[in-house]
């Protein structure tokens, strides 16, 4: 066994959840593929996409465009998350029906996920809810209606299972914040520091506090499949420079009045403890918190109990009022 393989094995053994399992959306054996329907006839021109949409009744047209926009805005969300995002407008079954219908002409693409080696006789024991992304027709249509907004190109997901993991995990944070009624805004990869060259956060969450103030959660997501320690060290040193230079983080199109916290999004408590041992998080001139999947992505979880602070080679789990 090579040194790299040995290191990867140790890493996987160290950073499981307390019950010995992994988060699905940070599982080292995660893989995915696009699954096309049997009657797949994708539209590849904008005029064709408009024609198909315009044949629908006004009600169905509005609902499908709404579902499509939510998929585009989420970048990559699983079906359960999309149902929750749309629950105030559509029933769960209505959302699923629209997603299925829009696959035929390539407005939506569905990804089948599996965990390698966790199956017997080709039967999967764990079946993650299917992530959904924009297809060719959906990408063309949304760029026509919402010019200037960012939408992920369909081909960006091919052979990119770890990106699907990362964005679905981030959507769980976004979805939970919306459900808590504390979310005041969400921005994917906002520009920071006044120049495009600086590393962008994975996302920015504007979170309201009970006294009416808004906190900017500057979130960076790292996964077990990457050099998470090196990534966080590089980010934190670059952001130390930006904070010392400007006295705060200058974020495009964001209020200068909000309190700011850098948040390291990770999957397990054990991983947070390890990072706290390797990086002195309280040495930075800004607050650094963890946001831990293990603390909130279960059936009884709540995002207010998912944050932790690294202190003296350990972590303190926070209980926020949201």
Image (spheres, rainbow, N blue to C red):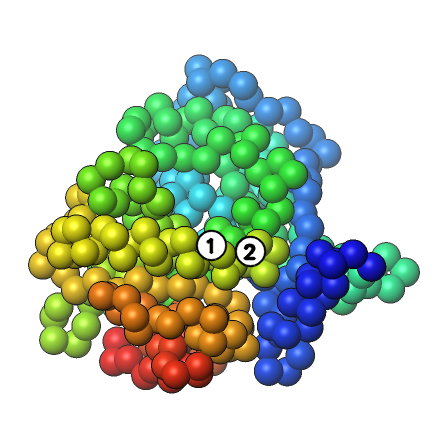
Give the image location of residue 185, x and y in percent: 25, 55
In the image, 224 versus 204, the foreground residue is: 224
| Left/right of residue 115 with respect to residue 193 in the rendered view | right
Image position of 158 with respect to 286: above or below: above
Q: State the mark number for residue 231.
A: 1
Give the image location of residue 290, x and y in percent: 39, 70
Residue at (68, 73) in percent of width and height: 13
Residue at (63, 24) in percent of width and height: 41
Disc 2 element: loop
Image position of 220 with respect to 293: above or below: above
Which residue lies under the disc numbered 2?
227
- Is there a contact, CB below 8 Å, between mark 1 and mark 2? yes
- The image quarter containing residue 147 is top left
Q: Residue furthest left?
A: 257
The answer to whether any part of residue 303 appears in the image is no
In the image, 191 versus 70, the foreground residue is: 191
Image position of 75 with respect to 311: above or below: above
Disc 1 element: helix
| Left/right of residue 306 with respect to residue 134 in the rendered view | left
How many angstroms separate mark 1 from mark 2 (CA)? 6 Å
């Amino acid at each position: 066994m090579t040194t790299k393989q040995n290191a990867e094995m140790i890493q996987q053994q160290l950073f499981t959840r307390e019950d010995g399992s992994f988060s699905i959306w940070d599982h080292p054996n995660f893989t995915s593929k696009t699954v096309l329907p049997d009657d797949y006839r994708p539209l590849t021109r904008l005029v064709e996409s408009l024609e198909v949409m315009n044949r629908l009744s006004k009600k169905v047209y509005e609902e499908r465009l709404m579902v499509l926009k939510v998929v585009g805005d989420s970048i990559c969300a699983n079906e359960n998350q999309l149902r929750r995002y749309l629950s105030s407008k559509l029933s769960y079954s209505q959302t699923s029906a629209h997603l299925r219908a829009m696959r035929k002409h390539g407005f939506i693409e569905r990804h089948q996920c599996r965990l390698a080696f966790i199956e017997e006789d080709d039967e999967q024991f764990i079946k993650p809810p299917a992530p959904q992304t924009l297809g060719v027709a959906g990408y063309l249509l949304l760029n026509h209606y919402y010019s200037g907004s960012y939408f992920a190109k369909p081909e960006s997901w091919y052979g990119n299972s770890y990106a699907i993991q990362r964005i679905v995990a981030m959507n769980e944070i976004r979805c939970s914040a919306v459900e808590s009624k504390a979310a005041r805004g969400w921005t994917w990869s906002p520009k920071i520091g006044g120049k495009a060259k600086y590393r962008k956060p994975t996302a920015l969450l504007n979170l309201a506090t009970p006294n009416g103030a808004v906190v900017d959660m500057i979130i960076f997501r790292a996964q077990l499949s990457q050099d998470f320690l090196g990534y966080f060290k590089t980010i934190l040193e670059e952001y130390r420079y930006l904070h010392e230079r400007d006295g705060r983080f200058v974020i495009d199109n964001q209020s200068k009045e909000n309190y700011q916290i850098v948040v390291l999004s990770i999957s397990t408590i054990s991983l947070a403890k390890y990072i706290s041992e390797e990086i002195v998080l309280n040495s930075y001139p800004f607050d650094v918190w963890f946001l831990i999947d293990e603390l909130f992505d279960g059936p009884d979880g709540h995002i207010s109990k998912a944050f932790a602070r690294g202190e003296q080679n350990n972590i303190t789990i926070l209980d926020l009022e949201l």
